[in-house]
Amino acid sequence: MTVLDMKIIVLSDAKALHGFGSEHGLSYLIEADRKNILFDTGASDVFMKNAGILGIDLTVIDAIVLSHGHFDHGDGLQFIDGKPLICHPGSFVRRYHEQGVGYIGLALTRADIEKKFELRTSAGPVQISEHLVFLGEIPRLNNFEARGTRYFLEGGEGDEIRDDSGLACITESGLVVVSGCAHAGICNMVEHARKVTGMDHVEGVIGGFHLREINPQTRKTIQYFKRIGVRRVYPSHCTAEPALSRFHDEFGLNEVYAGGTIVFN
């Protein structure tokens, strides 16, 4: 049995429909299995303002999923509370863009979050509902993704962003994988989602791919998506031009705008 459909309402992203706010951040409201899951909260209260414009009452959400501990995905947590929150245990480290400069971690500490939310941390997959899974830590298996990052932890060592994760949902038409930034590699994430769910066919992939140029990684990602038969691809957030345009050329113009809705069924 599969869930009939999955609706993704974009509450925060770099682009927005007319009348909605935008920011360097990501937040999706996911409706599936009669559950309302808030996936990331963006960098500010933009997600709440856009929800208000759409007439969405965020008090009805069943849980929050944090893809990883970067400010542009989790600083909106300051503006909501009282809900179950699922994330990797490594999401609360202090992290920087450069050694000791440019803090990019969460504004809230783990202690702060434990006071505000029903915190559940897991390095392994978490079954949120029958067809919706938090993927946990993503194994980094291929030879072209996650070959190191430019970020640093507080002690000065390189930050591999091991907390990077996503969601997988089984829909009528196949598996849908939702990524925050895909620091672990979007292909690694999709492959892990296939293994965790037991679903071979991937209908759609949406979210940040963390690809910037038309380089070997971007080309191999497109080749992988085509090889496994992904039909719908929605790169957003940290997917920059010209990589974004190449995905649009290969898979069609699938734009992601704050205030918009995407349905998989």
Image (cartoon, rainbow, N blue to C red):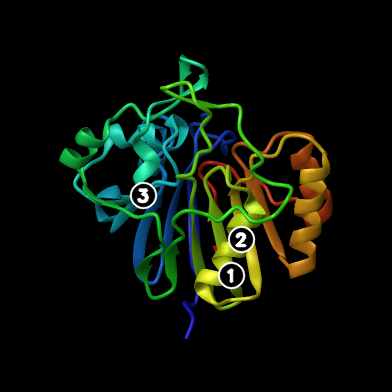
Q: What count of labels does the image hold? A: 3
Residue 183 sits in quarter: top right
| Residue at (53, 29) in percent of width and height | 158
Helix or strand or loop: what does disc 2 sit on? helix
Work out whether mark 3 precedes mark 1 in sequence or the reverse, and give the earlier one. Answer: 3
Q: CB atoms at circles 2 and 1 under 8 Å apart?
A: yes
Disc 3: which residue = 87
Direction from residue 128 to residue 209 in the image, left or right: right
Quadrant of the image for the C terminus? Answer: bottom right
Q: Are the two marked residues, 3 and 1, in contact with CB atoms closer than 8 angstroms?
A: no
Q: Which mark is residue 216?
A: none
Whether residue 90 appears in this view of the structure is yes
Residue 48 in view, yes or no = no
Give yes or no for contact between labels 3 and 2 (Cβ–Cβ under 8 Å).
Answer: no
Left/right placement of residue 177 relative to residue 167 reads right
Nearest to N terminus: mark 3 or mark 2: 3
Q: Nearer the viewer, residue 215 or 202?
A: 215
> Would residue 231 appear left or right of 200 to someone viewing this image?
right
Tell me which residue sits at (42%, 22%) in the image: 155
In the structure shown, which secondary structural element does the residue marked by tag 3 occupy? strand
Q: According to the image, label 1 marks what residue?
A: 194
Residue 190 is marked as: 2
Q: Residue furthest top?
A: 101
The amino acid beneath tag 2 is Val
Q: Residue at x 75, y 52 (%)?
A: 221
**Mark pair 3, 2: CA separation:** 18 Å
Which quadrant of the view contains residue 245?
top right
Label 3 to label 1: alpha-carbon separation: 20 Å
- Which residue is depicted at the point 82% across and 39% down? 215
Within 10 Å of disc 2 (Cα), the crowding (few <14, some 14-19, many 20+) is many
Q: Percent x, y for residue 257? A: 58, 42
